[in-house]
C-alpha cells in the first residue's frame, strides 16, 4: 500500500487539529493510500502536542525554544527515537526533510515563510493554510513552486472552493482559460450586523464569529474584514488573477464558499456547511474525493442565501489590504506586519477595535517605500520595520491617548 508521509506545521492550532482528525479518518478507511504523520510542529501548547505524539507517533517534532527542553525530557523515556527540534531552524528542517512528501502549513502569520520556501525548493506538495505567507511573498513563493515543480494546494475554504470550480489545476501562475473573475465570499465577521459605533466593542465580542470556529487572530481579522483583503491577495497569487478581477461579496450564511465566473456568463460555486474538514480533506485527497463526516447540505433547510456589498467605510482594513495588494512590492508585507501587531494589541486591551485600521494606516504611510521586485531579505526587513513602527504607534497611543488619524 502507498504511504504518504506528512508534516503538519501548526498542529495544535485549529487547522492542525482538524487536519489530524481528517488523517485519522482517512487511515481508518480501507481504500486509498495510508497517511503517515512523520512530523508535527507546535508553538507552546505542549499538552496537546504530547497527546498528538502519543496518537500519531511522529518521527520528529518542533516546538518553541521556550518549551523544547521540557518536551525533550518528557519524550526521552517514552519515545527515545523521537527527534525534538526547536524554532525556525527546526521548522525548516522538518519542512524540507527528505522523508516528508506532503507539507501542511497551518502556522499563523509571517513566521511560516522560511519553512515554506524550504519545502517548495525540495519540490514537495504543500497544502497552504498559512495565508500570510502568500500575502507577503506570493510572487516569490509561486515562482519557487514553478521553478522546483512543487504543487501548492489551497486549504483556505474560499480558495479551495475556487480550486474546486476551476477546470484546470491552478498554481501554475497562468490565469485559467475562459475565467472572467473570482467571487470571494465573506461571512461579514462578528460586527456585520452590529449597530452603532465600533469604538467600544471588546475582544470578547470580536471573537464571537457567527459561522466559523477558528483561532483568535483570524477571528479578529474576520471582524475587521482584513481577512477578506488578505484572501483576495492570496487568490491573486494562487490563480494568477489581478485584484481588480476579484469581487468580494458578504454572504452571512457561509454556505457558498466562493464562486468562479466565466466569460460566457456562467458561474460555478462550491457549497457546504462551514467545516474546515471539507477543504482540508480535499487538499489531502486531491484529485480524489473521499467520504467525510461533514453533515450533508440540505438546501431546503438552508432556504435562503444572501449576498451583499461590503461596507468599505465602516471596515477600512479591507480597503487598505486591497490597496496594499494592488500596489504590491513591500506594501502587502507592511500591511500584514502592522496588522499582526495591531490585532495582538487589541486582544491585549492596549488599543480599541477601531485602533486597528488606524495603526495599520499610519504604518503604511510611514513605510511606503517602493520596491518593485523585492527579495526575501527585503520582505523580512520590511515586515520587521512595520512591526516596530506599529509597536511604537501602540505605545504612544497608550501613553498620550493620541490617536493617529485615518486618512
Ligand atoms: Mg477563509
Image: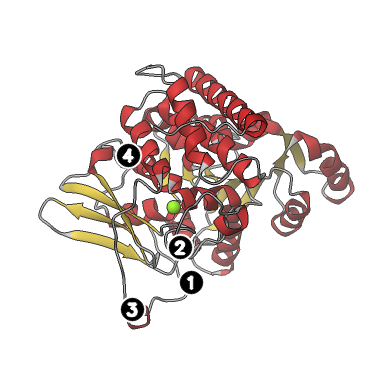
The N terminus: image quadrant: bottom right
Taking depth in this image into account, of 182 and 32 the one nearest to the observer is: 182
Taking depth in this image into account, of 7 and 390 the one nearest to the observer is: 390
* Vertical relation: 149 (above or below) 371: below
Q: Position of residue 351 (x, y in %)?
A: 60, 41
Badge 3 density bin: few <14, some 14–19, many ≥20, Cα 10 Å: few
Q: Secondary structure at mark 1?
A: loop
* Mark whose residue sits in front, 3 or 1: 3
Badge 2 density bin: few <14, some 14–19, many ≥20, Cα 10 Å: many
Decide: marks 3, 2 in contact (CB < 8 A)? no
Q: Secondary structure at mark 4?
A: helix
Tell me the tag on residue 278: 2
Q: Which residue is mark 1?
A: 294
- The answer for how far apart the CA atoms under marks 4 and 2 are is 22 Å
**Chain-order first, disc 1 or disc 2:** 2
**Chain-order first, disc 4 or disc 3:** 4
Q: Which residue is mark 4?
A: 236
- The answer for how far apart the CA atoms under marks 3 and 1 are is 15 Å
Tell me the tag on residue 299: 3
Badge 4 density bin: few <14, some 14–19, many ≥20, Cα 10 Å: many
- The answer for how far apart the CA atoms under marks 1 and 4 are is 29 Å
Amino acid at each position: 500500500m502507498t504511504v504518504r508521509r506528512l508534516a503538519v506545521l501548526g498542529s495544535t492550532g485549529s487547522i492542525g487539529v482538524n487536519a489530524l482528525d481528517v488523517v485519522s479518518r482517512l487511515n481508518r478507511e480501507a481504500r486509498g493510500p495510508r497517511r503517515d504523520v512523520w512530523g508535527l510542529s507546535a508553538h507552546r501548547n505542549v499538552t496537546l502536542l504530547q497527546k498528538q505524539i502519543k496518537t500519531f507517533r511522529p518521527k520528529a517534532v518542533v516546538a518553541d525554544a521556550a518549551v523544547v527542553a521540557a518536551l525533550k525530557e518528557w519524550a526521552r523515556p517514552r519515545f527515545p527515537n523521537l527527534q525534538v527540534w526547536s524554532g525556525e531552524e527546526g521548522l525548516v528542517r522538518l519542512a524540507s526533510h527528505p522523508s516528508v512528501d506532503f507539507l501542511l502549513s497551518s502556522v499563523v502569520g509571517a513566521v511560516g515563510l522560511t519553512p515554506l520556501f524550504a519545502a517548495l525548493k525540495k519540490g514537495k506538495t504543500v497544502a497552504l493554510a498559512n495565508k500570510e505567507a502568500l500575502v507577503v511573498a506570493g510572487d516569490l513563493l509561486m515562482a519557487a513552486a514553478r521553478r522546483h515543480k512543487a504543487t501548492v494546494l489551497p486549504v483556505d475554504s474560499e480558495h479551495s472552493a475556487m480550486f474546486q470550480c476551476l477546470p484546470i489545476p491552478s498554481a501554475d501562475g497562468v490565469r485559467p482559460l475562459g475565467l472572467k473573475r473570482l467571487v470571494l465570499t465573506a461571512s461579514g465577521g462578528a460586527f456585520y450586523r452590529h449597530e452603532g459605533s465600533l469604538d467600544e466593542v471588546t475582544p470578547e465580542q470580536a471573537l464571537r464569529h457567527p459561522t466559523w470556529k477558528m483561532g483568535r487572530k483570524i477571528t479578529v481579522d474576520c471582524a475587521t474584514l482584513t481577512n477578506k483583503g488578505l484572501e483576495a491577495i492570496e487568490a491573486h497569487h494562487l490563480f494568477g488573477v489581478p485584484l481588480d478581477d476579484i469581487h468580494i461579496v458578504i454572504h452571512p450564511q457561509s454556505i457558498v464558499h466562493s464562486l468562479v465566473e466565466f466569460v460566457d456568463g456562467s458561474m460555478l460555486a462550491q457549497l457546504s456547511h462551514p467545516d474546515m474538514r471539507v477543504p482540508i480533506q480535499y487538499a489531502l485527497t486531491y484529485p480524489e474525493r473521499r467520504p467525510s463526516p461533514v453533515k450533508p447540505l440540505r438546501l431546503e433547510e438552508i432556504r435562503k442565501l444572501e449576498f451583499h456589498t461590503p461596507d468599505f467605510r465602516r471596515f477600512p482594513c479591507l480597503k487598505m489590504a486591497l490597496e496594499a495588494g494592488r500596489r504590491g512590492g513591500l506594501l502587502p508585507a507592511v500591511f500584514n506586519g502592522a496588522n499582526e501587531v495591531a490585532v495582538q494589541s487589541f486582544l491585549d486591551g492596549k488599543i480599541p477595535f477601531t485602533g486597528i485600521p488606524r495603526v495599520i494606516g499610519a504604518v503604511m504611510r510611514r513605510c511606503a517605500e517602493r520596491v518593485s521586485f523585492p527579495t526575501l531579505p527585503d520582505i523580512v526587513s520590511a515586515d520587521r520595520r512595520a512591526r516596530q513602527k506599529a509597536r511604537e504607534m501602540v505605545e504612544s497611543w497608550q501613553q498620550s491617548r493620541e490617536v493617529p488619524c485615518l486618512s
